[in-house]
Amino acid sequence: MSKTKKPSPGSGSGEGPVRVLLAEDEESFIDALVIGLTNEGFRVIVARDGAEALSLYEETDPDILLLDLMLPKMSGVDVCRSIRTRSRVPIIMVTAKGTEIDTVVALEMGADDYVTKPYRLRELVARMRAVLRRAPGGPDSFEPAAIDLDREGVWESSGIKMDFDQRRAFVRGEEVHLRRKEFELLRLLIENSGRVLTRDVLIDRVWGTDYIGDTKTLDVHIKRLRSRIEADPSAPVLITTVRGVGYRFASLAG
C-alpha cells in the first residue's frame, strides 16, 4: 500500500524542517552534506548502505531521498525500485559516473532527478526544492486533467483543433505550423485548461529539469503561440498571464 504523504515541507506547510534521508557511503560527502544541508534548514538522516536506507525510510518517513547510485549491500537503483512500489516520495539519484546509461536507469526506476559528483551544494539544494515543489501536495504538483477527444482522437475548442497523435494544429479552420516545443507547450496548457501553471512547471515539463538556459525562452514561446492562436495577440484571451506566477489556458465554449 502506498504511503500518503503530507504536504511537502519547506513549501509553506509549516510542519517543521524537511527530513532528508541521505544514503551515501563516502564519509567526506556525508560530512559536507550534513553540514551544508543543515545550514540550509534541512534535517538530515544518514544511511551508509542500501539496506540501511530502506530500514531508515520505514522508520523515519522522510520527505525526500538522496540516493547514491553505488551503495554497499543494495544499489541505489534497487532501493529506488523498492520504494517506488509503495510511495511517490521525491528521490534524487547521485552518481559519480555521470554516464547516460546510469541516468536513464535511475530515471526509469522512478527517480525524480539526478546529480553528478562533484556537484555544488547550491545546485543540489535547488534541485531538491524543485522536486519538493512538484511532489504530491507541493505548490507545483499537478496531474493533467482528462480532455475530451472526438472519435478521431482530436481535441477541439475555442476555434482551435489539435490532433495530438499527428502533431497538427488548426486555428479557425487554417492549419498552423508549430515548432516542437511550441506544440508541447500548447498541449501542456490545454491539458491543464483553467489551471495556472507556474513558470518552473512549464520549463521543467517542456524543456526538462536539467535546463539551464535563459528562462525568457518560455516567454518567447508564449508570445509565438499567441501570435498563432489568438484573434488579437495584443489582448490574449486563450493564453493568459498570471503576473508573478505563470500562465493559464482558458478554454472557452464553442
Image: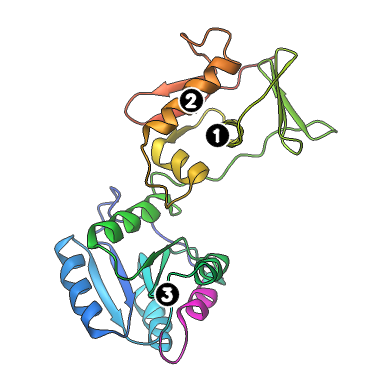
Q: Is residue 7 in view?
A: no
Name the secondary structure under disc 2.
helix
Q: Quadrant of residue 126?
A: bottom left
**Which segment did they paint magenta?**
71-83
Q: CA distance from mark 1 to mark 3?
A: 32 Å
Q: 240 or 98, which lies in front?
A: 98
Q: 94 or 100, which lies in front?
A: 100
Across and down, in percent, residue 82 comes to 53, 77
The residue that mark 1 highlights is 185
Q: Magenta segment: does it hold 80?
A: yes
Q: Are marks 1 and 3 in contact (CB under 8 Å)?
A: no
Residue type of the residue flagged with mark 3: Lys
Q: Residues within 10 Å of mark 1 (few under 14, many from 20)?
A: many
Checking the image for residue 222, the label placed there is: 2
Name the secondary structure under disc 1.
helix
Q: Residue at x 30, y 61 (%)?
A: 124
Mark in front: 1 vs 3: 3
Q: Is residue 114 left or right of residue 2?
A: left
Name the secondary structure under disc 3.
loop
Checking the image for residue 97, the label placed there is: 3
- Relative to 205, does residue 36 appear above or below in the rendering? below
Chain-order first, disc 1 or disc 3: 3
Chain-order first, disc 1 or disc 2: 1
Q: 58 or 101, which lies in front?
A: 101
Main secondary structure type of the part rendered in magenta: helix
Q: Are marks 1 and 2 in contact (CB under 8 Å)?
A: yes
Q: Quadrant of residue 157?
A: top right
Checking the image for residue 88, the label placed there is: none
Q: Is residue 96 left or right of residue 146?
A: left
Across and down, in percent, residue 64 comes to 36, 65
Q: Residues within 10 Å of mark 3 (few under 14, many from 20)?
A: some
